[in-house]
Amino acid sequence: DTTVKQNPRYKLARVGKPVNLICSQTMNHDTMYWYQKKPNQAPKLLLFYYDKILNREADTFEKFQSSRPNNSFCSLYIGSAGLEYSAMYLCASSGTAEQYFGPGTRLTVL
Amino acid sequence: QQKVQQSPESLSVPEGGMASLNCTSSDRNFQYFWWYRQHSGEGPKALMSIFSDGDKKEGRFTAHLNKASLHVSLHIRDSQPSDSALYFCAVRASSGSWQLIFGSGTQLTVMP
């Protein structure tokens, strides 16, 4: 089973409110990633966990938080959503080179 | 920072035709290229990877890499309507991790 699941699939949030997105995988992969995808743009890596070690990209360091309570689950947390956070958020996992993606969560901030 | 450029942005081919997609990396220290495909409502799924000069064929899909020009192409022969999707090129980041840097994609439409 190479399934990566994401919840919810769609999320509406108000400006200034927190947002929490969930990802799970059952492949026992040691690395999990979060990407942000906007229309006509490349998926942008926000952060990734290698085992229990969190690595955040420099330009998104203060905007996104994440936790990985166990190997299977990983969350993406936005403390105060702004309009610019409206996007598709893709979670992926990998054991070696290939990354396996979930279907994404479409976040709309109003 | 490394950039990955894809062309064209969109492409339409008739059913049974050949689709050709292009990708160029700006980093000479790249590790290897990936092609991912994303159907509507789904996440991207890996098609194939290539890191040696020349061609790599998997079924109807052929990737061609020219390391000197940092250019890779993907050719889909006998295109089917089910091939209609967003195709991403990705390059493994030169930092030594499994991180990928993606291009913005080519939207392929195969017309029945």
Image: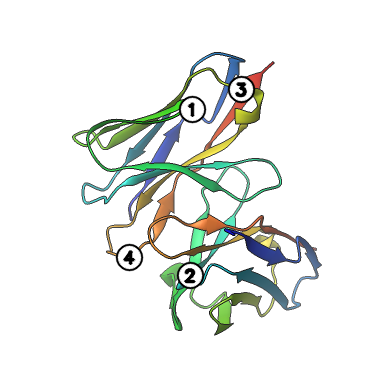
Dot 2: chain letter:
A
- In the picture, measured across the screen, residue A100 lies left or right of residue A107, that is left
Q: Are marks 1 and 2 on the same chain?
A: no
The residue pinned by badge 4 equals B97
- In the picture, measured across the screen, residue A44 lies left or right of residue B41, that is left
Number of the front mark, 1 or 2: 2
Q: Are marks 2 and 3 in contact (CB under 8 Å)?
A: no
Q: Is residue B9 visible?
A: yes
Q: Amino acid at mark 2?
A: His
The N terminus of chain A - image quarter: bottom right
The residue pinned by badge 2 equals A29
Q: Nearer the viewer, residue A32 or B68?
A: A32
Q: CA distance from mark 2 to mark 3?
A: 33 Å
Q: Which numbered tag is attached to residue B8?
A: 1
Q: Amino acid at mark 4?
A: Ser
- SS assignment at label 2: loop
